[in-house]
Image (tube, rainbow, N blue to C red):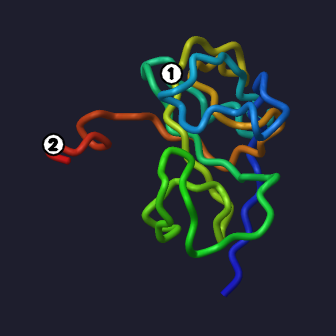
């Protein structure tokens, strides 16, 4: 089975080099912008009611993968799916970011941890009742 996705926009960030990109949104205070394609702009209605958003995107500069990796903050090799390592069989990334503002089809966000020009696949509101497990 083949699955095809088409980006709905692009994420702009101050990061142009993989080495300078924060490893997670919680380790970033960087501000960026999400530019949603005009044809999807209507879908942003009421998004201002949320403080945080879940962005799904493509690791567009990821090349290949390994099933055993050494994560950035670890000194041991781990199974890929037990990590958030960006080189994956399906190069899909996820970030929870703070929504600062919306102007038409552009969102200003904080906590950017992706490279400038990252293709955006989807946006979902972060809802603590749904997204934050009671016990972890």
Callout 2 secondary element: loop
Q: Residue at x 64, y 33 (%)?
A: 113
In the displayed structure, does residue 82 sit left or right of residue 129?
right
In the displayed structure, does residue 118 sit left or right of residue 42?
right
Q: Are marks 2 and 1 in contact (CB under 8 Å)?
A: no
Q: Residues within 10 Å of mark 2 (few under 14, many from 20)?
A: few
Circle 1 residue: 98
Q: Residue 44, located in which quarter of the rendered image?
A: top right
Q: Residue furthest left?
A: 135
Callout 1 secondary element: strand
Q: Residue at x 59, y 12 (%)?
A: 101
In this view, the residue in front, 46 or 66, is: 66
**Label tally:** 2
Circle 2 residue: 134
Q: Position of residue 27 (x, y in %)?
A: 52, 27
Q: Residue at x 28, y 43 (%)?
A: 130
Give the numbered dot on residue 57: none
From the image, which quarter does the N terminus lie in? bottom right
Q: Residues within 10 Å of mark 1 (few under 14, many from 20)?
A: many
Which mark is first along the chain, 1 or 2?
1
User: Above or below — where is 1 with respect to 128?
Assistant: below
Q: Residue at x 71, y 44 (%)?
A: 120
Q: Residue furthest front?
A: 75
Q: Residue 35, located in which quarter of the rendered image?
A: top right
Q: Residue 37, located in which quarter of the rendered image?
A: top right
Q: CA distance from mark 2 to mark 1?
A: 21 Å
Q: Position of residue 133 (x, y in %)?
A: 22, 45
In the displayed structure, does residue 87 sit left or right of residue 27?
right
User: Above or below — where is 125 with respect to 13?
Assistant: below
User: Above or below — where is 69 with respect to 10?
Assistant: below
In this view, the residue in front, 50 or 56, is: 56
Q: Position of residue 34 (x, y in %)?
A: 71, 28
């Amino acid at each position: 089975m083949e699955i095809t996705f088409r980006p709905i926009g692009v994420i702009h960030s101050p990061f142009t080099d993989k080495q300078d990109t924060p490893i997670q949104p919680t380790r970033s205070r960087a501000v960026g912008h999400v530019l949603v394609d005009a044809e999807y702009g209507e879908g942003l209605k009421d998004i201002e009611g949320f403080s945080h958003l879940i962005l799904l995107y493509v690791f567009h500069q990821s090349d290949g993968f390994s099933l055993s990796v050494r994560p950035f903050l670890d000194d041991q090799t781990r199974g890929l799916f037990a990590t958030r390592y960006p080189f994956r069989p399906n190069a899909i990334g996820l970030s929870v970011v703070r929504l600062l503002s919306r102007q038409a089809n552009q969102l200003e966000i904080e906590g950017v941890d992706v490279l400038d020009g990252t293709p955006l696949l989807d946006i979902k509101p972060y809802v603590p009742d749904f997204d934050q497990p009671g016990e972890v």
